[in-house]
Amino acid sequence: MPSKQRKIAIMGYRSVGKSSLSIQFVEGQFVDSYDPTIENTFVKTTRVKNQEYELELVDTAGQDEYSILSEPNYIKIHGYVLVYSITSTKSFEIIQIIHDKLLDMTGKIHVPVVLVGNKKDLHSDRCVSKDKGQALANSWKAKFFEASAKQNECVDDIFHTVLMETEDKSDPIGPKQMSTCSIS
Ligand SMILES: Nc1nc2c(ncn2[C@@H]2O[C@H](COP(=O)(O)OP(=O)(O)OP(=O)(O)O)[C@@H](O)[C@H]2O)c(=O)[nH]1
């Protein structure tokens, strides 16, 4: 099968771990220092269920409630990874605003999305319950993961799942891949 080109954007509030998840997936390492992103693109070839993908991963600058999603940046994006931190209620509120803006911008009622609650390793700082994350994902009809970029928990599953979400449901790629990380 020829490889497929996919452009995925990773979005969310500042400092939730968008770059850390991207770097963990693409380079297999965790960088502990915090360096705010302007915008960065990673490229990786990856295989999901016998299908090879040329993935272009756009690591966006953190958004807040006032950010305007300018259409040219989001053109030809096949799917979105929307990230909040389980340690930040604000980031959970912002992710809902970002999702609404995406629907407005695309004019669609559903876009291929995976919702991620990152920093799962910071148990004692948790502010957003797993149930709340799951309920939000359900309301979007989206897959949900709690993940840790630091401990490399569920990171591959996030990106493999969003790639599969970009497939037409009738695509012969087959049923969705499930793993112990998959919550919905
Ligand atoms: N404990 C823990 N820390 C994390 C995790 N992911 C990211 N961090 C830390 O959180 C901080 C922010 O991470 P980034 O990956 O830069 O966050 P970002 O969302 O790309 O930030 P912006 O570019 O400002 O939007 C850094 O200090 C990371 O080391 C995680 O899973 N666990």
Image (cartoon, rainbow, N blue to C red):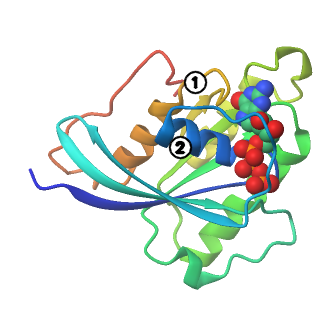
Whether residue 30 appears in this view of the structure is yes
Residue 124 x %, y % = 89, 15
Residue drawn at x 64%, y 27% is 146
Tag count: 2
Q: Which mark is residue 152?
A: 1
Residue 105 as seen in the image, left or right of residue 98: left
Q: Which mark is residue 142?
A: 2
How packed is label 1: few (under 14 Cα within 10 Å), some, or many (20 or more)?
some
Which of pointers 1 and 2 indicates the residue nearer the eye?
A: 1
SS at mark 2? loop
The amino acid marked with disc number 2 is Ala
**Quadrant of the rendered image holding ligand 1:** top right
Residue drawn at x 66%, y 82% is 70
Residue drawn at x 69%, y 69% is 101
SS at mark 1? loop
Residue 117 as seen in the image, left or right of residue 77: right
Cα separation, mark 1 vs mark 2, equals 22 Å
Q: Quadrant of residue 157?
A: top left
The amino acid marked with disc number 1 is Asn
Q: Are marks 1 and 2 in contact (CB under 8 Å)?
A: no
Residue 99 x %, y % = 67, 59
Going from the N terminus, do you reach mark 1 or mark 2 first? 2
Whether residue 85 appears in this view of the structure is no
Q: Nearer the viewer, residue 62 or 108?
A: 62
Residue drawn at x 70%, y 34% is 117
